[in-house]
Amino acid sequence: MSRSRQVSPSDLAKQANAAFRDLIAHLRQTTPPGQKPVLPSPPQRDLYRCAMYLHGELSRAGVSYYFCGGFACINVGMTARTTSDIDIAVPNGNHGYGTLLNILSRPPFVQDVTGTLPPNSYYFYVESSGNFVEVDGIIAGFMAFPTLDQARVIQAGQFMQLNFLEPAGLLKLKLSSWANKTRRLGPKRQGDISDIVSIRDLLISNRAAIDLRRLTSDPANGLRDWVREFGDLKEWQKLDRSYRG
């Protein structure tokens, strides 16, 4: 969103809601019967517009965060793919997740009330292009997501300085997702495969070491399921020679 145009919040809300209604109507018309509508992937510049907006609003509120998911994999995991959503983790509490929800509850964000798209997601309206970016808020420390004090966060971009969970942390999250059979056999399978291979190979090329034997719960189960399916134990042993699957 361009702040220099000084669009009033009410006018922006009208624009966003009108564009979103058109999007929902288009998805309903073009989605084949029996399939779930999927938000089309916006161009990368729109993803960065959304990320910069979130960064600016949270920074002004003094709330720490990190991007994870596909957007982070593209930026710090060197994954060659596209994504339609941005996952952002913030601390729990009023001055954290509460602040994020306040940001997401006002323009340029909208929610789908028709049941066409996921009900708990928020959609950032990119005023300059008319596209939407899906945003999913996450409580840092929930399930496999590390808390801010446990995570190693790195900044990417010479000018943007966005905060991302570092590659090893992203890899563990992806392995946790791989432990979910429904997910790994679902529509996000190919994206997850691309992310895991790309991040693992990046870590290997950087001569990183990860204690794979000490993985627990879903990350450990996900890695075992991966090795069982793809038979690439030797590649993983480049990160931990003692790992036996």
Image (cartoon, grey):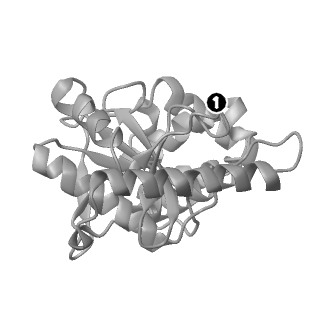
Residue 156 in sight from this viewpoint: yes
Residue lying furthest bottom: 158
Residue under the point 31% across and 34% down: 101
What percent of the width, then of the height, locates residue 151? 26, 41
Q: Is residue 114 above or below residue 24?
A: above
Image quarter hosting the C terminus: top right
Q: Position of residue 241 (x, y in %)?
A: 47, 48
Q: Position of residue 98 (x, y in %)?
A: 25, 29
Is 242 positioned to the left or the right of 235 in the image? Answer: left
Identify the residue position indicated by label 1 in the image: 180
Q: Closest to the observer: 227 or 170? A: 170
Say which residue appears at 31% left-offset and 32% top-offset: 140
Which image quarter is the N terminus in?
A: bottom left
> 23 above or below 225?
below
Left or right of 142? Residue 198 is right
| Residue closer to the observer: 192 or 202 | 192
Q: Is residue 57 left or right of residue 78?
A: left
x and y, in percent, of residue 129 in the image: 48, 72
Q: What residue do we see at 55% from left, 66% from top? A: 42
When the figure is inspected, residue 24 is found, relative to residue 138, above or below; the finding is below
